[in-house]
Image: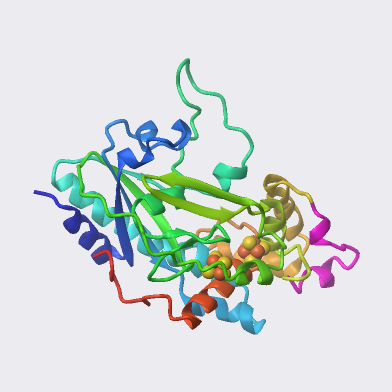
Amino acid sequence: MLTAKMVKDCAIRGGADICGIASVERFQDGPPETHPTSLFPDARSVIVYASRILKGSYKGIQEGTDWSTYWIYGYGSGIYSSLGSATGAIAALLEEHGHEAVPSPGGHTLLDEAPSAREPLGKGRLPPCVMLHMRVAAALAGLGEFGWSKVFLTPEFGPRQRFDILLTDAELEPDPLLREPICDRCMACVRECPGRALGGERESIRVEDREFAWGRVDCGKCKVTHWGLNPEASPFIRKDLPGMHMEVEKTTYTWYEAYRLGFALSERIDYLKLIANGSAEHGQGGRPGSVCGAVGCIQACNEHLEGRGRLRGGVKGKGNG
Ligand code: SF4
Ligand code: SF4
């Protein structure tokens, strides 16, 4: 008989670093457009697994010598290749035991900030853009919690990982929700964020007897900084667009406006264009690069948590195998 342990061991062997399982009942209070059964009506369990973002992928940005490595190994095929291998391995195991396996990449900013959903294809149907909320799914699978920055934190890697999700009709024993907090509200993320995007009002969700809380993120300010349009984080903007004075405190872009501005301007900034073209070869579709390099929300948090000895470190599969 298929067990939760077999599934989690398979995820680790397949390339993931950590894996957890949520029962579908834990999603009962979630909106239908992010509910597992809206994607797969027979779903009984939600399998969430992650690969670590390599610490060394930040080095080029820290040294001021290479902005492409984090974009590839923090976002692109460099990290998603291991997640893709894990997805294939888990799905094969589930199918060999007579179950269905439905992959879902999950989302976060898109769900919070994207333009309103397209029209449903028929009466009584949901719009064709149902997507699980990745951070919520990871929390419900017992993998960790939201940090104050809203970046998801795990006991193994703190803020350094990316997730994938598989839905299945197999009844698998769920993992307990994380009890011991990781985020100690040090606010290093807020202080170090060059986009002044963090530290908004408190938001929260409650699942069973656990509350997950974070500070609201200004996704417009984050996005213009992330795309390299904020001179506090990007040395390229002053060189190629000397007349542009982006004062990020005064910007009030929505996330989607900032997203489109990045596509429009990166073509006019030589280094951003170079990263975008280079990243196309690594499955990033020629999008502008992650110039901020998450120096506040991820890098500052990782340094703080490691310095305090609060992370278990990168022993593969530890804690969830
Ligand atoms: S830096 Fe990390 S631990 Fe500190 S408040 Fe931000 S999310 Fe929490
Ligand atoms: S990506 Fe950069 S701008 Fe956005 S929240 Fe993180 S540190 Fe701030």
Q: Residue furthest right?
A: 243
Q: Quadrant of ligand 2?
A: bottom right
Q: Residue at x 68, y 45 (%)?
A: 256
Q: Position of residue 71 (x, y in %)?
A: 56, 67
How many numbered discs sit on the rendered protein?
0
What kind of colouring is applied to the model shown?
Answer: rainbow
Secondary structure that dominates the magenta span: loop
Residue 242: say if magenta. yes
Q: Position of residue 258 (x, y in %)?
A: 72, 51
User: Which part of the image, by quadrant, shows the C terminus?
Assistant: bottom left
Q: Position of residue 249 (x, y in %)?
A: 80, 59
Q: Position of residue 117 (x, y in %)?
A: 57, 32
Occupied quadrant, residue 273: bottom right
Q: Residue furthest front?
A: 209
Q: Residue at x 13, y 50 (%)?
A: 2
Q: Residue furthest top?
A: 123
Q: Which residues are magenta?
A: 234-251
166 and 208: which one is in front? 208
Q: Residue at x 58, y 44 (%)?
A: 112
Residue 76: say if magenta. no
